[in-house]
Amino acid sequence: MTTAGPDWQHLDRRMLVVHPVVDLVKLVPVLLVIAITGGSTDDRWRLWGGLVLAAAVLAFGVSRWFTTTYRVGGDRVELRTGLLRRHHRSVHRDRIRTADLTANPAHRLFGLAVVRVGTGRREGGDDAELTLDAVRRGEAERLRALLLGGATPDDPDAVAVPELARLRWTWVRFAPLTFSALAVVGAVWVGLFRLAEEFSLRVPDAEILRESAGRAPIWLGAVALLVTAVVGAAVVFVEGWWGYRLTRADDGGLVLRRGLLTRRTLSLEGRRIRGVELDEPLLVRLGRGARPLALTTGLRADGQGEHVGAVGPAMPRREAHRVAAGVLGVPPAAGTRVPLVRHPRAAVLRRVTRGFAPAVVVAAVLLARPEAPGDAVVVPVLLVLAALLTVDRIRSLGHALTPSHLVTRQGAWVRRTVVLRRGGVIGWRLTQTFTQRRAGLLTLHAVTAAGRGRYEVLDVGVDRGLELVGDVTPGLLTPFLTDGRAAGRLVRR
């Protein structure tokens, strides 16, 4: 494989336009506040201060091109940055886990892209990621393929890659059912209310507007919130997943492309995929939907945002099972749809106790309050909801062991089905609380270098738990089983 020359290279010259423009756009809200609050003669200095700040941001954006250089050698990738304080970062190519591309509207307008070279270090640090912002789109694709060992798109020997999934616009119906989308819309509403409160001090008819709003029926406000949530969630979905395609690369890895305003290309090497996870938040599950994720080494959970490991948006459950099976390279019946082994009766009783106890305590507190007629309706509804969630938790609890994977499922608010490759399990942690010891149960934590790093098999019998550990990692427990007292030696409180 040929590599880039040893000479230091500058980023693309077009970044001299892109960076100042992007930085100035970020500064617009600050300049607007300065302009609004600095209208008097005595406050003109604020306006001049804003102009000086804009000029400084412009100069800093231009200086980045002169102070940033990089080179890709045969064994290392190096980056030099900084004007007053110089930084020299160097990453060995054997440690590179990801080389992902992003392009916001300004980058796309000028044919540029940002290359983020990651080492997958969970604790972050200066050597956790190198960012080349920005290079030509073709050069970015070449660097990504070079650093990950794949073929470039312009390579005549490259073959067509099979497609695992493509966006279907009917999936937008799941957008209002996701907690993240609702959180974004809620944040927007809070920001609008605070902005209205600030400006109401300067609006002469503010009292009249507030009185009119107070006379409006409650259902009208509820409808407005609902419409805003639905439309806002759909907008967030369209921006994030526009043009979504998931394809299989030649090396068995995955290539994910998505985004309307900001275009993103994420590459996952096949040899680093340790399994899949199928998430079903409560509202999405009620809509018969789910979201597939890939458990991959090299993705930091603290740096990639909400979509860490996500290989698709919330989609119909049948389609999510198919995508998860495609990521694993197995039939759906051998992946997330494999029949699960039910847990002992003691585990079911624990689900009942843990599900009902908080609801019973809250109900008792409500009924103990004097002169609370509304509680006669609230308490039965609370107990019915607790019963439904408890039944759902019982139905969700289970595990299975296939010739190549460990499968575990649990959860009610968010049901998670995890399919982990046996070879991806690098260790175990066995825990047992006081009540679990009394019930003869324990919880297994399968340790892996991918995803969240640890996945639970909740409330299994002690004998069954030790059997699972022995089957997934043969010989690991042999030194501890010599005297037949494995549970006391292995289980940590």
Image (cartoon, rainbow, N blue to C red):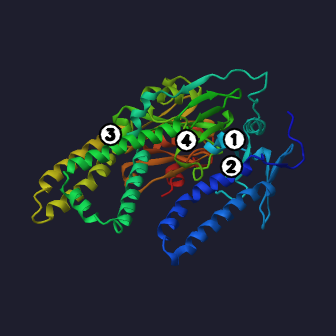
Which residue type carries mark 3?
Answer: Asp
Which residue type carries mark 2?
Answer: Val
**Residues at circles 1 and 3 in contact by the CB criterion of under 8 Å:** no
Marks 1/3: CA distance? 51 Å
Residue holding disc 3: 392
Q: In the image, residue 473 lies at what x, y percent?
A: 61, 39
* Label 4 vs 1, first from the N-terminus: 1
* Label 4 vs 2, first from the N-terminus: 2
Residue holding disc 2: 18
* Label 2 vs 3, first from the N-terminus: 2
Q: Residue at x 81, y 56 (%)?
A: 66
* Label 1 vs 2, first from the N-terminus: 2
In the rendered view, tell whether residue 470 sits above or below residue 34: above
Marks 4/1: CA distance? 54 Å
* Front residue of 161 and 241: 241
Q: In the image, residue 85 lies at what x, y percent?
A: 78, 67
In the rendered view, tell whether residue 232 sits above or below residue 138: below
Does dot 1 land on a helix, a strand or a loop?
loop
Residue holding disc 4: 469
Does dot 4 land on a helix, a strand or a loop?
helix
> Label 4 crowding class (10 Å Cα cut-off): few <14, some 14-19, many 20+?
many
Q: Quadrant of residue 87?
A: bottom right
Does dot 2 land on a helix, a strand or a loop?
helix
Residue holding disc 1: 110
Which residue type carries mark 4?
Answer: Val
* Label 3 vs 4, first from the N-terminus: 3
